[in-house]
Image (cartoon, rainbow, N blue to C red):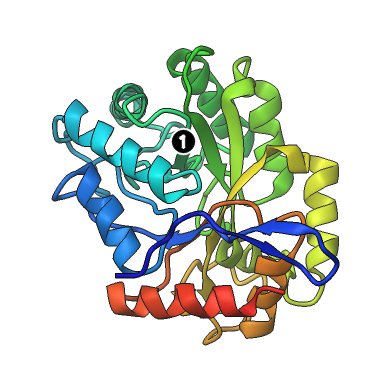
Amino acid sequence: MVSATSREDATTEGVVARELAIGCHLSSSKGYAAMGREALSIGANTFAFFTRNPRGGNAKKADPQDAAELCALLDREGFGKLVAHAPYTMNLCSAKPDVRDFGRRAMAEDLERMELLPGNYYNFHPGSHVGQGADEGIRLICSALDDVLDMGQSTTVLLETMAGKGSEVGRTFQEIACILEGCAKSDVLGVCLDTCHVWDGGYNIRVDLDGVLNEFDRVIGLDRLCALHLNDSKNDCASHKDRHEKIGEGYLGINTFAAVVSHPRLRDLPMVLETPNKLDGYAREIALLRSLAW
């Protein structure tokens, strides 16, 4: 088993850098602590998990003792922050009231359970406006967030950058910024940047990573960037298709990921793989990404 205990490595200039926090999505079917042990077995020191079935439905009852065991493991092994993921069916800006109501209920329940793992992240897709228009979609998302969020919660809720497929909201940094600005409780909000999504959405991180990050900083603010999803893409820039590929095997290419994991504005963020892999493939990608960092 590969230990993911916290280590600090001195750079050639004598500056101390933290070990990259890299992981992948893990199944929660065997409980919280089991996910921590599985993460260690593949060399991960962060991970993501779905708070309930990714296609929706009711969540399994949480076990506080199991959660406490995971918290102890995370602390002992020096894990980065976890990035829990809301179900894909959660659409806070649906044209259907019952779908919006499910989204609010699911998020409220998920955030209550996340307090068993205090101080981590809860990531969600902003939603699809399904013909209502982006402005109305953003208004509905802000309304839902203001109803659900609690300024006393320890969990930071992350808006994921989207590829622009269909009527997705969050396809541009401007749309993400509008949600942050329109939500009265935005102090507990942040952003998760997905490399495949921003590339498919038209942000050329392969050629100009610094330029894209500067644009993010200008429109949203890099202080809002809390986590990364690391995915190569099966499609070219601005395709708006959202089809993930293994690291280095898509249009982004290996050099893009070397730049991402080494970038001083990104390297300290938790990085979660969502590539088409099983555990052994994730273990190889985690090792590969660590080897690429300079």
Name the one closer to the observer, 193 or 2: 2
Residue lying furthest bottom:
249
Rendered-image quadrant of the N terminus: bottom left
Res 274 visible: yes
Bin the neighbour count of mark 1 within 10 Å (Cα to Cα): few under 14, some 14-19, many 20 and up.
Answer: some
The kind of secondary structure element at disc 1 is loop
User: Where residue 252 appears, x then y in whole percent?
Assistant: 63, 79
Q: Which residue is mark 1?
A: 120
Q: Quadrant of residue 238?
A: bottom right
Rendered-image quadrant of the C terminus: bottom right
Location of residue 119 with respect to 292 vertically, above or below? above
Name the one closer to the observer, 10 or 166: 10
User: Where residue 39 appears, x then y in whole percent?
Assistant: 33, 60
Name the one closer to the observer, 77 or 119: 77
User: Where residue 214 appears, x then y in whole percent?
Assistant: 85, 53
Q: Is 40 left or right of 60, judged from the image as shown?
A: right
User: Where residue 127 appears, x then y in whole percent?
Assistant: 47, 41
Looking at the image, which residue is at 40% across and 68% down? 43
Location of residue 223 with respect to 272 vertically, above or below? above
For badge 1, the amino acid type reads Asn
Q: Quadrant of residue 164?
A: bottom right
Total tally of numbered discs in the picture: 1
Name the one closer to the observer, 263 or 150: 263
Q: Is 61 left or right of 90, judged from the image as shown?
A: left
Res 276 visible: no
